Each structure stands twice: as C-alpha cells, then as structure tokens.
Amino acid sequence: MSSNQTNADAQTKHEQTIADYVGDMVALESHIEEALDRQLDEVKDDSTASAAVQNFHDMVKRHRDSLRALQEETGSTPGNPVKAAGAALLGKAAGVIDLIRTEGISKSLRDDYTAFSLAAISYSMLYTTALGLGNQRVAAMAEGNLTDYAQAIERINEIMPGVVERELSKDGHQTNPGAVAATRQIVPRAWHTAERESSL
C-alpha cells in the first residue's frame, strides 16, 4: 500500500471519529434543550432564575443548531447510529437529564449544573479529539461551547444562594440575612483554592 493511500485512510478514519463525536454532541445538546424546555414554566415564579434558564435555553439551542450545521462538514447526519462510546455517553446524559424533573427551582438549577458539567467535560474531550486529529474548525467550536458552559455554571453559582433563600422564606423560614452574601463569597473562594492547589 502506498504512503498516499495510508495517509488517505488515516484521514478518513480521523474524519469519521470526529463526525461520530459531533453527532453525539448534537444528541446531548438536544437532550439538555428538551429538559430546559420543561423548566421554562417551572421557574417562572422566580424572575432571576427564569431569566437565567431562558438564557441557558437559548445557549443550548444555539449550540445544537450550529452543531447540526457542522454535521454537513464532518459527514455525520442526525440519522446515523451512535457508536458504542456515544451511546454510553448519551445513556449517562439521559440519566442526568431525567433529574431535571424535581420540584423546586433550586433543585432544577442544581440539576442544570450537573447537566452543564457533563456537557463541559464532553466539549473538553471533543476539543482534544479535534485538535489531535487536525480539525481546527471543530476544535474552535468545542472551545466556544465549553466556554459558554463554564459561564453558565458560574451563573448558577452566582444566583443559587438567592434562589435558595427565597425558597426558604416562601416556606416560612426566617433566614440569616448574611447567608446569601456569605455563600457568594465562599463558593468562588473554594474554586480559586482548588485551582491554586492543583497548580502546585
């Protein structure tokens, strides 16, 4: 077999691997969008959470649509069967997304956090795959979507204390007025401490 043929075969394998992964991410984003569709009505009584979930929904829909457009480039189609690795990913995703049926706005946001973390690490994996196999376009999209999810997770960290406090008050509890501010201080401090220690 000539070196040209070997290179062509390797490139075809690269492209198929990326195409399969992009198809998996389309399915994952679609699962998350469906869950957020349900949530839009569930969080409407809290204006802060409602605005956040609407923004999350718009973000996920944008991701899904751009990934579908990218499928044309990578050669994957929505009807292609998902390979074993992708099926395992989606099985885990379905389990996570099913959690977004719990009552309570704070619990819904907690489950969004879980789903978004799954999407974030999945985009980290896709970025490594695409960069490793020489597809800059897919790598750039993976990086952008990963950044979106990191920002969404940060937003949940920001608003969660207030949501929890409002739910406690609604249930008749008299809360410590400093609890929300204190939580907003310790959460980023915990992340920064972990980040600092991991770099040592």
Image: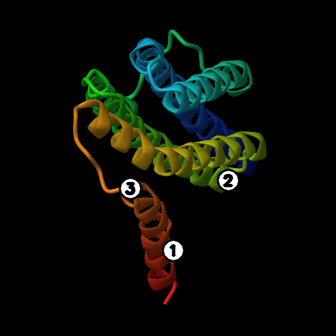
How many residues crowd around disc 1 within 10 Å: few (fewer than 14), some, or many (20 or more)? few
Residue at horizontal 53 percent and vertical 34 percent from the top: 21
Residue at horizontal 60 percent and vertical 20 percent from the top: 76
Q: Which quarter shows the N terminus? A: top right
> Residue 68's spot in the image, x, y percent?
65, 19
Q: Which mark is residue 173?
A: none
Which quadrant of the structure image shows residue 13? top right
How many residues crowd around disc 3 within 10 Å: few (fewer than 14), some, or many (20 or more)? few
**Marks 3,2: beta carbons within 8 A:** no
> Could you tell which of marks 1 and 3 lies nearer the N-terminus?
3
Q: Nearer the viewer, mark 3 or mark 2?
A: 3
Looking at this view, is 5 or 169 the one in front?
A: 169
Asked if one can make out residue 23 in the rendered structure from this viewpoint, the answer is no
Residue at horizontal 48 percent and vertical 16 percent from the top: 40
The amino acid marked with disc number 2 is: Leu
Looking at this view, is 6 or 71 the one in front?
A: 71
Q: Answer above or below: position of 2 versus 99.
A: below
Say which residue label 1 marks: 192
Q: Which mark is residue 177?
A: 3
> Residue 149's spot in the image, x, y percent?
57, 43
Q: CA distance from mark 1 to mark 2?
A: 28 Å
The amino acid marked with disc number 1 is: His
Looking at this view, is 135 or 162 the one in front?
A: 162
Residue at horizontal 67 percent and vertical 53 percent from the top: 131
Say which residue label 2 marks: 131
Q: Answer above or below: position of 141 versus 24.
A: below
